[in-house]
Amino acid sequence: MIELNKVILGDCIEVMSSLPDSSVDLVFADPPFNIGIKYDNYDDKKNYDHYYSWSEEWIKETYRILKKSGSIYIAIGDEFAAEINLILKRIGFKFRNWIVWYYTFGQNQRKKFNRSHTHILYFTKDENSFTFNSDEIRIPSARQLVYNDKRAHPKGKVPDDVWEYSRVCGTFKERLGKHPCQMPENLLERIIKVSSNEGDIVLDPFGGTGTTAAVAKRLKRNYITMDISEKYVEVITKRLVGKIKEIKCKTDVFEFSQSLSLFDDRSEYPKQKLVTAKAKKKK
């Protein structure tokens, strides 16, 4: 069992397997794309069958832990977008949108056109019962800005399924370290606002630099985030300490084996000090 608002060092399948059924409101996942990116302790060039079966395994866990009203968004590259879409459908998720995140500052390629987009597959657990706060994400429409049409919705329109956000480049103030796939905060803000409410639980099985957790906390959601890399757990922790100072909250790092129950009855622990694992110091 996992306590809320903690950074967990551990394998995502192992961590998620400890969570109860129907306990999470929203999942955002940005898994390794299996295209040979150099991570510190993960092989990003598995054979096709291995990557497919691994993807199926962790996505099955997200289905189990999501509430009936829950949603999942998976960011994935061209190479396996079709396969992830198929896995989601076979497991039982209901398709909502195939979003294309188009980013400026595309990634240079030598023998093909430059990569300037990522797919974001949006599915829900139930076809009819799910959270979609459209008024939270509306943007100005052409009817308003160009034609001054009085029939336009006063708050603007729901965004299309092509989203334009810049990548978090190395020179950006938002950039944290050298993680190859840092997600922009404004993209996560849209997802978390539309598919969750204050107090909900947002889970990210591939924590990376902690963007999901940081935005979730800022928007008054609870988060569960994890990473298999001790290096990136440290990055997330440092980031969240900076974010959490704004709302006077404390974040600890848990070793997975030492995590406490999220769903226990807290009346069993009246005002006692919970013992948590400390972040490991650099040698």
Image: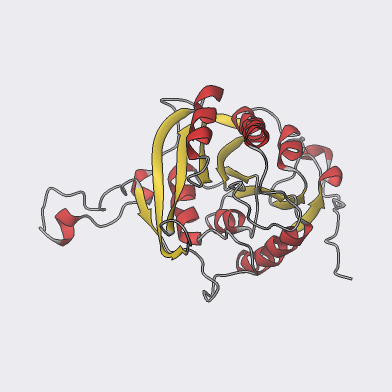
Considering every residue shown, the one lying at the far front of the view is 111
Q: Is residue 67 visible?
A: yes
Q: Quadrant of the N terminus?
A: top right
So how many labels did they put on this image? 0
Residue at 46% across / 60% down in the picture? 186
Residue at 61% across / 37% down in the picture? 24
Near-viewer residue (247 or 149): 149
Near-viewer residue (146 or 165): 165
Q: Quadrant of the C terminus?
A: bottom right
Relative vertical location of residue 219 with respect to residue 242 in this rendering, above or below: above
Near-viewer residue (62 or 277): 62
> On the rendered structure, is 264 left or right of 180?
right
> On the rendered structure, is 87 left or right of 223?
left
Q: How is the image coloured?
A: secondary structure
Residue at 49% across / 40% down in the picture? 81
**To which quarter of the image does residue 234 belong?**
bottom right
Residue at 63% across / 52% down in the picture? 36
Relative vertical location of residue 156 with respect to residue 69 in this rendering, above or below: below
Q: Is residue 125 visible?
A: no
**To which quarter of the image does residue 103 belong?**
bottom left
Position of residue 184 measured from the top left corner of the image (x, y, whole percent): 50, 61
**To which quarter of the image does residue 281 belong?**
bottom right
Relative vertical location of residue 21 with respect to residue 40 in this rendering, above or below: above
> On the rendered structure, is 120 left or right of 144?
right
Position of residue 43 measured from the top left corner of the image (x, y, whole percent): 71, 49
> On the rendered structure, is 279 left or right of 220?
right
Position of residue 211 measured from the top left corner of the image (x, y, whole percent): 58, 58
Position of residue 115 measured from the top left corner of the image (x, y, whole percent): 44, 57
Relative vertical location of residue 93 with respect to residue 48 in this rendering, above or below: above
